[in-house]
Amino acid sequence: FDPFFVSEGIYVTMDGGTTWTGNDTCTGEPIAFHNGDPGIAIDKNGTFILVRVGDPNFFPGVFSHYSTDNGVT
């Protein structure tokens, strides 16, 4: 457990919620020092877009992560 590691992840289901796949940590830089406030959208082409706020002391700003394969990666 690292109290300074905060991240977001995405899980998806393709069978109505019976099983879920995903990861607790989004890929891309920076993967640590998140400050929360995640938001997610899915566009008409199935692109998942997750936005979140960076830690103002290390990585200030708004960051986005995306998946173009319905959230599989």
Image (cartoon, rainbow, N blue to C red):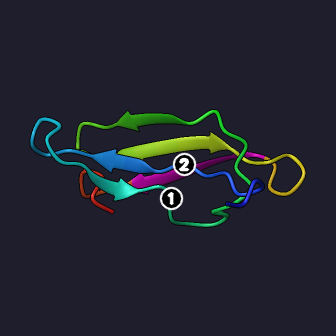
What residue lies at 76% left-to-right and 46% top-to-bottom?
61
Count of picture labels: 2
Q: Position of residue 48 (x, y in %)?
A: 36, 46
Secondary structure predominantly adopted by residues drawn in magenta? strand
- The amino acid on which the numbered mark 2 sits, given as a three-letter code, is Glu
Q: Residue at x 86, y 46 (%)?
A: 56
21 relative position to 37: left or right: left
Q: What is the span of residues highlighted in magenta in the rendered image? A: 61-66
Residue 1 in picture, x, y percent from top left: 67, 60
User: Which residue shows up at 45% across the image and 36% down it?
Assistant: 40
Q: Please, is residue 55 above or below residue 69 in the view?
A: above
Q: Which numbered disc, 1 or 2, marks the residue that appears first in the sequence?
A: 2
> 48 or 13, which lies in front?
13
Residue 47, visible in the rendered structure? no
Q: Residues within 10 Å of mark 2 (few under 14, many from 20)?
A: many
Query: Is 36 rendered above or below residue 66?
Result: above
Q: Position of residue 21 (x, y in %)?
A: 27, 55
* Tag 1–tag 2 contact (CB < 8 Å): yes
Q: Is residue 13 visible?
A: yes
Question: Crowdedness of circle 1 by 10 Å Cα count: few (<14), some, many (20+)?
Answer: many
Q: Which residue shows up at 24% across the image and 37% down it?
A: 44
Is 2 left or right of 63, judged from the image as shown? right
What amino acid is at disc 1?
Answer: Cys
Give the distance between the C-alpha atoms of the residues marked 1 and 2, in whole angstroms. Answer: 6 Å
Label annotation for residue 26: 1
Residue that badge 2 annotates? 8
